[in-house]
């Protein structure tokens, strides 16, 4: 019963439905001896299976994450500030402090814990559209630590966060920072912050690929959207690295 309900549930989702249509088209093409059509539809169905039914996307993303895992936060050096990049939350009118947390909210928890442990003398919050101000208001109300909280002005992308951090660092006399962001996004982030002249101690979080690999898993033939989301993160980061290199930002 569980297998049947899971199969039906996945087949009515867009990814599963498209996969089923491709399989039917492939079988039809084989029966009618339409070789090219059979190869084309079969190859697409196989691609969707590899992405949506295997851990291949998780292995790719975990490869970006692995270098930035920190097992002992207590062993980290003390720095002038902890800088957390945006992306973990957004504005919503109906929630406490107008904060809607996203999957990457791990960034916020990690940054706050590092400051609480005394690893930074201040917390700087990134993000765009007033995201930093929302978190600043929340943290200053709850007071999990005594260190000051700063928020950046509006940012369009990670490079803006790096340049805005550099400007505040110059004003505050900061030289060395702990940088907190999703582990799969860390390589590009570190390169950006070092480019603007800061000494960076990277602390990764939001281990999407690694978490998928460590979760109990058994092969299931009908693909699901999760693998495509993971693959999109990997592709976004690789293309972002290339784009930033071509722009001379890293």
Image (cartoon, grey):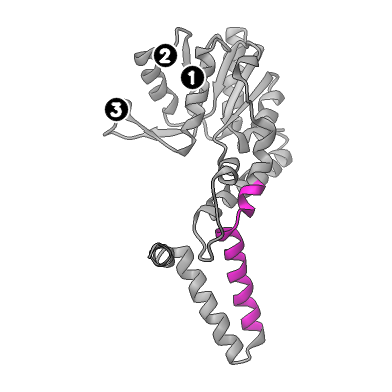
Looking at the image, can residue 149 be seen?
yes
The one nearer the camera, 25 or 196, is: 25
Q: CA distance from mark 3 to mark 1?
A: 18 Å
Where is residue 83? Give x, y as percent: 56, 21
Q: Who's the residue at 62% across and 65% down the image?
A: 47
Residue tagged 3: 96
Callout 1 secondary element: helix
Quarter of the image for the C terminus: give it. Answer: top right
| Dot 2 crowding, Cα within 10 Å, few <14, some 14–19, many 20+ | few
Marks 2 and 1 close (CB-CB < 8 Å): yes
Please provide percent x and percent y for residue 167. Answer: 59, 17
- At x 51%, y 30%, the residue is 155
Element type where label 2 sits in the image: loop
Horizontal and vertical percent position of residue 119: 58, 12
Is the C-beta separation of discs 2 and 3 under 8 Å? no
Circles 3 and 1 in contact, beta carbons < 8 Å: no
| Residue under label 1 | 112
- Numbered circle sitting on residue 144: 2
The quadrant of the image that shows the N terminus is bottom left
What is the span of residues highlighted in magenta in the rendered image? 36-60
| Residue in front for this viewpoint, 232 or 72 | 72
10 Å crowding of disc 1: few (<14), some (14-19), many (20+): some
The image quadrant that residue 82 belongs to is: top right
Residue 107 lies in the magenta-colored region: no
- Residue 52 located within the stretch drawn in magenta: yes
SS category of the residue bearing label 3: helix
Q: Label 3: how many residues lie within 10 Å, few (<14), some (14-19) or many (20+)?
A: few
């Amino acid at each position: 019963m569980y297998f049947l309900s899971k199969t039906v549930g996945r087949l009515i989702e867009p990814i599963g439905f498209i996969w089923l249509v491709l399989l039917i088209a492939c079988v039809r093409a084989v029966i009618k001896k339409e070789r090219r059509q059979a190869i084309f539809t079969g190859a697409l169905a196989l691609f969707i299976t590899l992405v949506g039914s295997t851990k291949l996307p998780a292995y790719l993303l975990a490869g970006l994450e692995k270098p930035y895992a920190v097992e002992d936060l207590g062993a980290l050096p003390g720095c002038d500030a902890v800088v957390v990049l945006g992306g973990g939350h957004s504005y919503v009118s109906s929630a406490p402090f107008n904060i809607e947390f996203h999957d990457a909210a791990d960034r916020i928890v990690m940054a706050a814990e590092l400051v609480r442990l005394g690893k930074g003398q201040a917390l700087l919050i990134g993000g765009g559209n007033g995201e930093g101000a929302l978190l600043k208001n929340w943290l200053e109300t709850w007071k999990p630590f005594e260190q000051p909280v700063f928020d950046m002005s509006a940012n369009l992308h990670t490079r803006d966060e790096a340049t805005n951090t550099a400007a505040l660092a110059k004003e505050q006399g900061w030289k060395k920072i702990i940088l907190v962001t999703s582990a799969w996004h860390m390589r590009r982030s570190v390169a950006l912050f070092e480019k603007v002249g800061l000494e960076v101690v990277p602390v990764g979080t939001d281990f999407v690929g690694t978490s998928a690999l460590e979760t109990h898993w058994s092969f299931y033939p009908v693909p699901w959207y999760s693998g495509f989301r993971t693959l999109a993160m990997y592709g976004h980061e690789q293309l972002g690295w290339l784009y930033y290199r071509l722009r001379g930002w890293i």
